Image: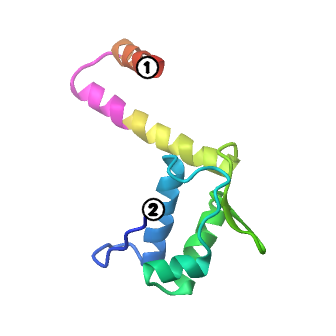
């Protein structure tokens, strides 16, 4: 797992860690059932406080991306998880909204957009 902390970012460090782990889970770089590094290990590797990584992991757990089990660590949850499904649905809706806006700007019809969706789906 690769996490890059930027001091130039507007996001606090815990949010940068959370968002990067979330993105890696969503794009499949971190797989379902995979055990994340311990909070202490992650803090040491990133050169941040344990409080920072604890907050990131806690947020990820509240959002339904991971589950923390005493003595076993934090594990990535299944994509069948309702909270995680909701995150995927939001991402799909945002992508479709962007595509529809772009299509409307160039005068495409609904049928033309549906044909593109069908073509992409079948690839």
Q: Position of residue 110 (x, y in %)?
A: 37, 17
Residue most extreme to the left: 106
Residue at which label 2 appears: 20
From the viewer's perspective, is 63 left or right of 110?
right
Q: Residues within 10 Å of mark 2 (few under 14, many from 20)?
A: some
Query: Which residue is located at x 40 percent, y 16 percent?
Result: 119
Q: How many angstroms separate mark 2 from mark 1 (CA)? A: 28 Å
Relative to the observer, which residue lies in front, 100 or 116?
Answer: 116
Label 1 secondary element: loop
Q: Which residues are magenta?
A: 98-109
Q: Residue 120 location in percent, x, y?
A: 41, 21
Q: Is residue 61 above or below residue 29?
A: below
| Residue 5 included in the magenta stretch of the image | no
Asked if residue 107 is positioned above or below residue 94 in the image, the reply reads above
Q: Earlier in the sequence, mark 2 or mark 1?
A: 2
Numbered mark located on residue 123 in the image? 1
Mark 1 crowdedness (10 Å alpha carbons): few <14, some 14-19, many ≥20: few
The chief SS type of the magenta part is: helix
Which residue is found at the position 48% from the left and 38% from the top? 92
């Amino acid at each position: 797992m690769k996490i890059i902390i930027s001091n130039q970012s507007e996001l606090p460090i815990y949010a940068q860690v959370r968002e990067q782990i979330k993105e890696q889970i969503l794009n499949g770089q971190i797989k379902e059932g995979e055990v994340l590094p311990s909070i202490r290990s992650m803090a040491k590797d990133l050169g941040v406080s344990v409080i920072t990584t604890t907050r990131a992991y806690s947020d990820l757990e509240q959002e339904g991306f991971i589950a923390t089990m005493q003595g076993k660590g934090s594990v990535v949850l299944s994509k069948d998880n309702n909270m995680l499904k909701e995150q995927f649905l939001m991402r799909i809706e945002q992508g479709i909204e962007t595509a529809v806006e772009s299509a409307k700007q160039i005068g495409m019809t609904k049928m033309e957009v549906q044909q593109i969706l069908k073509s992409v789906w079948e690839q």
